[in-house]
Image (cartoon, helix red, strand yellow):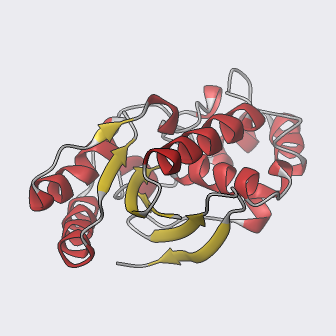
Amino acid sequence: MTTLVLARHGQTVWHQENRYAGVSDVDLTDAGVRQAAALADWSRLHRPDAVYVSPIRRACETAGPTLAALGIEGTVVEDLREVDFGVGEGRTMAELAVEMPSVVAEYRRNPAANPLPDAESVVTAAERGSAALRAIAADHHVGTVLVVAHNTLLRLALCQLLDIPVARYRGIFPRLENGALSTICIPDDGLVSLLSLNVPL
């Protein structure tokens, strides 16, 4: 049985303004740096057996203090990257609603069927995210693994792993807070349990 502790990266300058960061590289705020330090403090206490990280810079910078505290190297997994939001990158939902109201209305109604223009399908993202988490669990048959990734990718992966329709991800999991931890258990039979959600550091 493997326990995965899922951490959202620290706050960035775009998240502070509620802008979609997606696959863009955005700097951490001072609050984000403090959240990364708090994750390192948690890691010193709980001693995860391994750390896996999204390749996007804000996730790597969040994981950095933890890896230094543990004296280990993290494993970067490409499929842990955030969803590409297409035209949404760098914009707020309010700005998009002014620019393309009908598109945003359809997206809000069913994001699985109506992705933002040029964006990655949330169905595809859910599949790659959940597959990445299962692969990590398969590499660690017992113990605890810390995974540092992203708000939307993790919410979609949770839906896929827990058999929740992906189209409902915005309602079921409205938000994972920056720096907060969510914990799942993946036993050998593959039936995933959600142990905790959005626990602040």
Percent x, y of residue 102:
88, 37
Residue at horizontal 83 percent and vertical 57 percent from the top: 168
* Vertical arrangement, residue 128 with respect to residue 138, above or below: above
146 vs 9, nearest the viewer: 146
In-image side of 158 versus 123 (left or right): left
Percent x, y of residue 50:
30, 53
In-image side of 105 versus 84 (left or right): right
Percent x, y of residue 134:
58, 46
* Vertical arrangement, residue 74 with respect to residue 48, above or below: above
Q: Quadrant of residue 118?
A: top right
* Vertical arrangement, residue 54 with respect to residue 68, above or below: above
170 vs 196, nearest the viewer: 196
* Vertical arrangement, residue 123 with respect to residue 174, above or below: above
Q: Quadrant of the C terminus?
A: bottom left
43 vs 29, nearest the viewer: 43
In-image side of 90 versus 163 (left or right): left
Residue at horizontal 44 percent and vertical 62 percent from the top: 142
Residue lying at the far top in this picture: please name it.
118
> Number of callouts in the render?
0
115 vs 131, nearest the viewer: 131
Residue at horizontal 41 percent and vertical 79 percent from the top: 200
Percent x, y of residue 28:
27, 50
Residue at horizontal 82 percent and vertical 57 percent from the top: 163
In-image side of 30 versus 126 (left or right): left
